[in-house]
Image (spheres, rainbow, N blue to C red):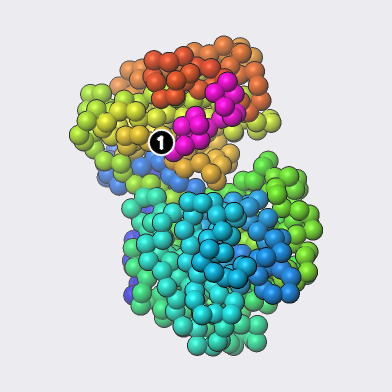
């Protein structure tokens, strides 16, 4: 059973990294040391916290169009390609002849070749889940109220120590009573099968006429159903074709809810999530290849719903030695890439990428990133960086792209790197010793959105050059060629 006490315990655990970051920032502002002198509460919290987090974009998508309740016409595919969800909860999951090769092709083209999926079998309009991360278990629970689909579920190995259970649902249109019966059965399945220590998301087409339907109250036993809700650029949160009813939902449990972060697409930020309607989204180019008419296509009866969350990555292991290493081997941490001239005028998009190129984990507690003027970021207690792993520090968390794993916003809210006059970026350990540093001229910050990177990627002794000379404009959180570390 997912008891209330266990959910409260998980809520506290989920908030730990946020609390540590706040304590660390407060200590820094007061001029207090961060290594062992921020109080017993912070020290205890630090045992369980980590500075690193992964943005997870969840999307509910009943985006079929045309006459056959399928994704064949392409309107829904383009919307999902533009939004780039990490985990999509699909309804009416039909494509081509529904062969294994057809569905695999759909997933590869719409999401990416590395994505895994589960699609329920033997259903006329099956539910399913597509995930950037491995699906370690999956199946379906019987929806006894309807004959042509069930409740599809997948347990997903998201980054960090906690798995995520994703449940894709498609409730009936026949009435609120029938939908509440379905919700009661779903809650029973969840209480019986879902590990109380895992995250939970229920998403899909609820066909609800209001936010206060009985089924929403029933689901509140296992997920948070209260406002605020996702909206489009005009502030409309309704999701049916006529934009008058809240048909579609992404609901998460009490441990995942406090980890929500704004959905940032292009230059727009949606604090509580996004309802995707291509007819009103602006600029439309931010969700290319979606077309303006896609959300109004024939028999497109729903809008997509998107919510983003920053999931703590968990400890990478090891305490820090004199050189900042932990566990077996030796940590070697370098500044590998810097973007001083952000794309456009959103300075929150500046970033500094640091990489552990050594063989042991690095304890980053109390480490800082500074420019020539002041300290811009301080890693909180418990932070660590595994070998062959990067962390990207952005000017502000609002600018962290959904495609970049292991990214955080600067603890001061800004990096403020100079473009025209050049600057010096320095990574220091908790004792104040310089670990890695780069002094750059204005020529390395002269092009909008083009970063500077080690001329030999991951070589701490190499000079910095414009990323464009190595290929592409930038590669935050990845090798210079776009490959994973």
* Above or below, comparing residue 174 to residue 299 in the picture: below
Q: Quadrant of the N terminus?
A: bottom left
Stretch in magenta:
467-485
Q: Residues within 10 Å of mark 1 (few under 14, many from 20)?
A: some
Residue at numbered disc 1: 485
In depth, the one of 259 and 54 nearer the eye is: 54
Q: Quadrant of the C terminus?
A: top left
What element does badge 1 sit on? loop
Which residue is at 43% across, 15% downward? 462
Which residue is at 37% across, 62% downward? 136
In depth, the one of 395 and 277 nearer the eye is: 277
Q: Is residue 174 left or right of residue 4?
A: right
Which residue is at 61% across, 64% downward? 61
**Image location (x, y in percent) of residue 382:** 31, 39
Residue 131 magenta: no
**Image location (x, y in percent) of residue 179:** 58, 83
Q: Residue 102: which quarter of the image?
A: bottom right
Q: Is residue 408 left or right of residue 347?
A: left
Report whether residue 318 is seen. yes
């Amino acid at each position: 059973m997912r008891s209330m006490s266990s959910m409260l315990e998980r809520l506290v655990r989920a908030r730990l990294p946020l609390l540590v970051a706040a304590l660390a920032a407060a200590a820094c502002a007061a001029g207090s040391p961060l290594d062992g002198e921020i109080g017993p509460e912070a020290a205890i919290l630090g045992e369980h916290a980590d500075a690193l987090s992964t943005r997870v974009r969840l999307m509910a998508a009943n985006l079929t169009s045309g006459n056959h309740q399928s994704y064949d016409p392409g309107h829904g595919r383009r919307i999902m390609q533009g939004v780039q969800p990490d985990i999509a909860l699909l309804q009416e999951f039909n494509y081509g002849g529904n062969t294994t090769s057809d569905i695999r092709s759909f997933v590869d083209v719409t999401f990416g070749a590395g994505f895994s999926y589960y699609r329920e079998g033997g259903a006329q309009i099956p539910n399913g889940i597509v995930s950037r991360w491995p699906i370690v278990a999956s199946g379906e629970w019987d929806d006894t109220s309807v004959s042509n689909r069930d409740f599809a579920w997948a347990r997903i190995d998201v980054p960090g120590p906690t798995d995520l259970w994703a449940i894709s649902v498609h409730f009936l249109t026949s009435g609120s009573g029938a939908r509440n019966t379905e919700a009661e059965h779903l809650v029973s399945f969840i209480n019986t099968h879902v590990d109380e220590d895992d995250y939970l998301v229920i998403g899909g087409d609820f066909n609800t006429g209001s936010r206060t339907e009985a089924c929403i109250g029933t689901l509140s036993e296992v997920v948070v159903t209260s406002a605020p809700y996702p909206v489009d650029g005009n502030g409309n949160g309704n999701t049916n074709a006529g934009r008058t009813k809240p048909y579609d939902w992404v609901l998460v449990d009490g441990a995942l809810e406090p980890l929500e972060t704004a959905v940032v697409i292009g230059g727009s930020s949606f604090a509580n999530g996004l309802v995707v309607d291509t007819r009103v989204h602006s600029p439309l180019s931010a969700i290319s290849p979606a077309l303006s008419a896609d959300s109004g296509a024939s028999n497109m009866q729903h809008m997509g719903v998107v919510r983003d969350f920053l999931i703590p990555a968990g400890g990478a292991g090891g305490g820090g030695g004199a050189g900042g290493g932990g566990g077996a081997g030796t940590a070697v941490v370098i500044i590998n890439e810097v973007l001083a001239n952000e794309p456009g005028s959103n300075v929150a998009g500046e970033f500094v990428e640091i990489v552990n190129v050594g063989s042991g984990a690095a304890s980053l507690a109390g480490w800082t990133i500074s420019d020539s003027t002041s300290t811009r970021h301080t890693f909180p207690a418990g932070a660590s960086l595994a070998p062959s792993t990067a962390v990207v520090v952005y000017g502000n968390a609002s600018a962290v792209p959904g495609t970049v794993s292991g990214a955080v916003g600067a603890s001061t809210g800004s990096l403020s790197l100079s473009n025209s006059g050049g600057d010096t970026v320095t990574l220091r350990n908790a004792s104040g010793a310089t670990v890695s540093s780069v002094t750059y001229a204005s020529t390395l910050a002269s092009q909008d959105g083009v970063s500077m990177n080690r001329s030999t990627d991951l070589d701490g002794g190499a000079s910095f050059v414009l990323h464009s000379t190595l290929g592409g404009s930038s590669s935050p959180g990845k090798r210079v060629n776009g490959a994973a570390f």
